[in-house]
Every structure is written in C-alpha cells, then in structure tokens.
Amino acid sequence: MRLIKFKIDKYKCIDDSKWIEVSELTVIVGKNEAGKTTLLKGLHKLNPFNKEPYKMDREWPRSKRNERDVKQIVCTAVFELSDTDINEITTIAGQSIFSKLIEVTRNYADEFVIGTKDIFKDELAPELSKSVTDFIKMNLPTFIYMSDYKIFNGAALLDQVWHRKQSNQQTEEDKTLLTILDLSGLTIQDEVTKGNSPDTSVREQRQYDLDDASATLTRTISERWNQKKYEVKFSADGQHFFTFVKDEKDPALIRLEERSKGFQWFFSFDLMFMYESKGSFKNCVILLDEPGLHLHPDGQRDLLKRLENYSKDNTLIYSTHLPFMIDLQNPEGIRVITESSAGSFVTEELTNSQPESKFVLQAALGMSGASSYLLSYKNLVVEGVDDFWFITALSNLFERSNEESLNDEIFITSAGGASEAVYISTFMIGQKLQAYTLLDGDSAGNEAKEKLLKKWLTKYNDTKSSVDTLNEVLEVKENDFAIEDIFTEDYYLSKVKQAYKSQLLATDTKTIKLKGSDLLVNKVERALKDLGISFNKGSVAKLIRKDINQMKASVELADTTRKAAQKIISHINKKLS
C-alpha cells in the first residue's frame, strides 16, 4: 500500500495545504518557520507508530477559535492498493473492487475513517465491511517522524532517565536510549536496580548482560540493516551508562558522544527506523524534518544518496531549506511550501512560491550547474559543459565568418545531465522566462524530453518554451546522437590520440578501432577501456574547442561538421526568436 497524495487542513499555521502529490522521494522546500514541521507532523499523526491524536486546544489555527469543530478532518491521505492488497480484499469481501485508490482521514475527535465504500460497486454487509476495514488499517504504512533533535549521544545517567520516564518528562534523547535498550533486550528498570547494587556478583553479571546485549544489537542491525555496518559495545559504572560504536569506515570503537553530530544522527536514525518499522524496514512513510543540519555539504550529498536507499522500500518525505539537500536528479519530487494571508500551502509551481523559497532552489541549481543562469529572458539549456563549449565556439566561428551565429540575447546554461536539464528548464519556465532545451538523442535524453513535455510544459501551458533532441534537429533517425557526433570519427580520434598520447604510447597502440553504432564518445570509451585507459571526454572537448577558436573561417571545418553546426545554430535561433 503506497501513499499517493495527502492534504492538511485547519492545523496550526496551515488552513489548507492543497493536495500534495507524493513520489518515492519527496522534498518540501521552504524558508524557516514557513510551516514545514507543521506539515510533516500533521501527516505523521494520521498513522504513527505510537498513537498521537490531534489536540484542538494547541493545534487549531490561531485567531479562528469560533470555527472550532471536533469533526474537522486534519489529514486526508490517498493510498494505492498493491496487487496483494487487492487479492486479499477481494477474498474477504467476496467481490472485486473497481478502484485501486482508497482515502483515509483522521479528525480532531480522533475518528479514523477508511473509505471502503468508494472501492466497491455494491454495499458490503456490516461484518464484511469491518473485516475489510480492519485489513486495510492493519496494512497501512507506519508513519515515522524524526527531526535532527532525536539524537542519543551515547552516555546517560540511568536513574535520571528512569525518573523522567516515571514522571512522563522524557527527553528525545531519553526516548532514543530506551529504544536502544529495548532493541538490545535490556530494560531501564533492571539496569537502574543493578547499578545500585553493592554485590560484586551482580556487577559481574551486569557486565555479562551488557556484553550479550551489545552482541545482540550488533547482530540485529547486521541482519536487518544492509545500508550500514555497525558494531556496538555497552559499558556501565553504577548509574553511568556508555555506548561505544564503530562502523566499516572507522574500525575503532569510540564513545558515541565523541563521534561527529552527523554520525550520531545516522546511528540514532537507523536504530529508530529499525525499531518503529518493527525491523522490517518496509511499508513505512518516513518523515524527516530538516535532516543533515549538522552535516558538512559533502555529508549532505552523501545523505541524499542514503535517502534514496531508504526510499526504495518506503515512501520518504523530508523538509529542507539547505540547497545541498535538494535532489536535482529527482525534480518531480520537489514541492515548495509558501506562506499567504490564508496560511501556508504547498505547490509545485515556482511562480506561486516566495522569493526565499526560490532562492533555495536557485542556489541548489547554481551549485550543481556548470555556470550561472537566469540572466536572460531567452535561455538555451544543454546537458553539459561540453555542449556549452562546442556551441559557443562554433557560434563565434560563424560570426567571424559573417554567417549566422547565436542571437546575442540567448544565454546558455549547462546542466549536470539530462535530468538536471529538465529541472533547470522547469525553473526558468516557472520564472516566466523562455527556455529551449537541447538534449542528446540517447535513452536519458529521450526520457528527459518526455518528462519535460508531459509533466512541465503541459502543466505551465507554456507555448514559447520547447525541447528537442539533437536527432530531431539534425533529422538523424537510426542512431543515438550527441554533440560530439557532429565531428567526423577521424577528426575526433585525432584529438583523442593527442589527449592520450603518453598512455597510447605505453600500450604501443597506433590505431584505435571503434565498434558499435551508438554515441561516438561511448565507442571511444569502450575502445580505450580495452586498452586499460580511462576516458574523459572533457579532455578531448577542450582540445576541439581550442582548435575551433583558432580557426579563421568556418570553411576550415569538415563539410559535414559545418552543415550540422549551421543547422543547430539556426534551429536554436528560431526556437528562441
């Protein structure tokens, strides 16, 4: 059962969030205090690991006291049933369903409603309806919420933790410690009792139990959690409790509180996730509030990769105001939260977001892209810096030759690949700028084109922006085609030999034999790999750019290269006229 979309109503600063579509990995982008935490907490309370009802006294929107109603639905979520779910429900109900989507709601009166009536044509008998409802409720994903503050630093005074637990004043660190003890087969009450005992045999048995608990937790993690290999060691002296941890990157056992904040966060999160998902690591909706605040930008990039792994078996939604925490390879998962006089709401449309939110996105794109952008109303977006170099150099050559060159108003932005080109283009379109996206004619380029056409250009109803692949521009139908393919094989290989002269001499290679009918750079990469040489097309591109910049007239280009380049330049000008 997978979460498809949700909305939050009449909850703290949110009056109506609007429907928020959810992908496997969704990020809520916005400035501080915009309502990101409120949004995630409102969703979390729909079906948390531990029951946590909505509280009207504290959570009803301020200044709307006269509108209070316990029947007010706070969270509405739509789930898609899996094939297994459908088969089970069909068996229970004795009739087939006509919709895979089911709506679930929870209100301030803590009434949890599952819309089973919407998926059957005929009304079910009360006992069957209850059985179907019970099945769906039992199989709904568990909602796990975590913020950067739920970190256990490794050391604690057990009697103080026990006292706070007894008086219901536990801190987030206390809760994490209790979770770790539970996963290890220990109880806080027993450890407090043993810590107060003067008996030597009790202390010896206690250390044996701690060693066994350490081994138990280490084994449990290794069996159930493949993303990270931890080894845990517990130690205690009276009421003082210590945790030592190591992982595969650092084999030394070090006290957890002496580890970096980032390591502490990862360790605590992995254990909390294992605990709240009952060790299955599946069928969860993971809600992370501002993850990565304690991490260096490089660590934030690593965290993004980690989140992708988490989201393979679970829906993951996280909030951020950090540019490095925006996954530009997953542009369809980006949502923007913004404030208005009616309360905070979420949108996919950048034109409706506030400048602060746009700045976060713009910063992310600027850090990831190879050049700055958004400086013109007419923008050409290409996949990489090589495309930028070639098109710029060829345009300048045509200008020196008194031939058609790129319009001076056109600004070129190079992305970090086809998928990032899609989002950069979308951002420009959202800013009401004209964007023409030129992609390679390979599988990645074709996929990116379809995404841009069907999801974004249609969504914004933009008629002045467009997207093409180089195959379409040059009317090449039979093969993959990238910017390097406008050059002849002989010319391109001459530059390859120039760039890798010493490596080729070492292998006593005089002729590079190319095989296949795909992209020229792919054929070269395979040929060099067979020779034990790692290929970087950027090194060759620099030599070609230098060569073009030294040409006095376009007639110095190979005839096929010249005609292809003229066609590309002319086509770009027409698209951005």
Image (cartoon, helix red, strand yellow):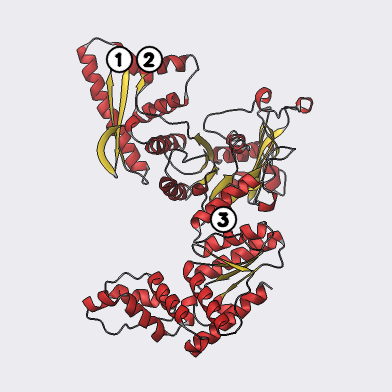
Kind of element beneath mark 3? helix
- Going from N to C along the chain, the mark reached first, 1 or 3, is 1
Question: Whole-Å distance between the Cαs marked 1 and 3?
Answer: 53 Å
| Front-lying residue, 546 or 189 | 546
Question: Whole-Å distance between the Cαs marked 1 and 2?
Answer: 9 Å
- Tell me: 295 left or right of 29: left
| Marks 2 and 3 in Cβ contact (< 8 Å) | no
- Tell me: 299 left or right of 405: left
Q: Mark 3 — residue?
A: 331
Closer to us: mark 2 or mark 3? Answer: 3
Q: Mark 2 — residue?
A: 159
- Tell me: 343 left or right of 324: right
| Front-lying residue, 178 or 138 | 178
Amino acid at dot 2:
Asp
Q: Mark 1 — residue?
A: 195
Give the image location of residue 176, x and y in percent: 42, 28
| Marks 1 and 3 in Cβ contact (< 8 Å) | no
Kind of element beneath mark 1? helix
- Going from N to C along the chain, the mark reached first, 2 or 3, is 2
